[in-house]
Amino acid sequence: MDSWLNVIQPKDGKITLKHTGPGNVKYIWNEFVKEFLKSKDDWLLSCHHDVVFSPEAVNRLLSWENPLISALIFMRQSPPVPHIWNSYEGQEERMIQRINDTREWFYARPEWIKFGPFVIDPRPDDALVPVDFTSTSFTLIHRTVLETMRPYVADLWFEMDDELKGGGEDRRFFQNARMAGFIPYVDRSCVVGHLVGDVPTSAADFIAWDSASVFNNTGEQ
């Protein structure tokens, strides 16, 4: 709750917090989207319960004026790699994580290889990167995205990959958004923490893992 208590409100608006609670994603999340579209609000922010963020995070995403944009988040399971995915050689069914360019982006900014959530200031011009999909853990969605998606998804904006065996909702959501003509982006200058218990994974965890992974168990590169 500290993240929400300290969040900086948008200059020309306000944030209304609604907790969806546990339960069936297919029902609860989509009912919430329907209610959102009945309102006069412009933006919906998807924020998962295991995410912590800087006070400036919402305004940073808004500053790009992009209809579908996410903060950078790292996996909370080991390894803590960036949750940024692109298709492998254009094959929609094969996705790879963008480890190499994320590493190089932070190596060029060693002062920002930090633990926990943060927002890089001033905003780097090359922070924004198009993706095929990312996590919906901290994603800002303009209402036009959801309205345009509606004919494609039949009011099922969010749906798990497999309702019985589990799997995320994010890949399908971004796939449908792209089908509706929207390019998802990740802002690498806005990093949110992904909680493992009380400790959030972040850029420093990723770089530490990446640095260790280039050596084998004999210490040779």
Image: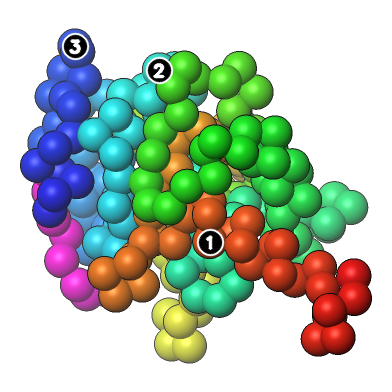
Q: Position of residue 133 (x, y in %)?
A: 60, 50
- Figure quadrant of the C terminus: bottom right
Q: Amino acid at mark 1?
A: Asp
Pointers 1 and 2 in contact (C-beta within 8 Å): no
Q: What residue span does the magenta drawing correspond to?
A: 17-24
How far apart are labels 1 and 2 at the CA level? 27 Å
Disc 2 residue crowd, few under 14, some 14–19, many 20+, Cα 10 Å: few
| Residue 205 numbered tag | 1
Q: Nearer the viewer, residue 86 or 195?
A: 195
Q: Amino acid at mark 2?
A: Ser
Q: Position of residue 143 (x, y in %)?
A: 34, 30
Residue at 13% x, 37% y is: 6
Residue at 70% x, 63% y is: 210
- Residue under label 2: 63
Mark toward the viewer: 1 or 2 = 1
Residue at 38% x, 52% y is: 116
| Residue 12 numbered tag | 3
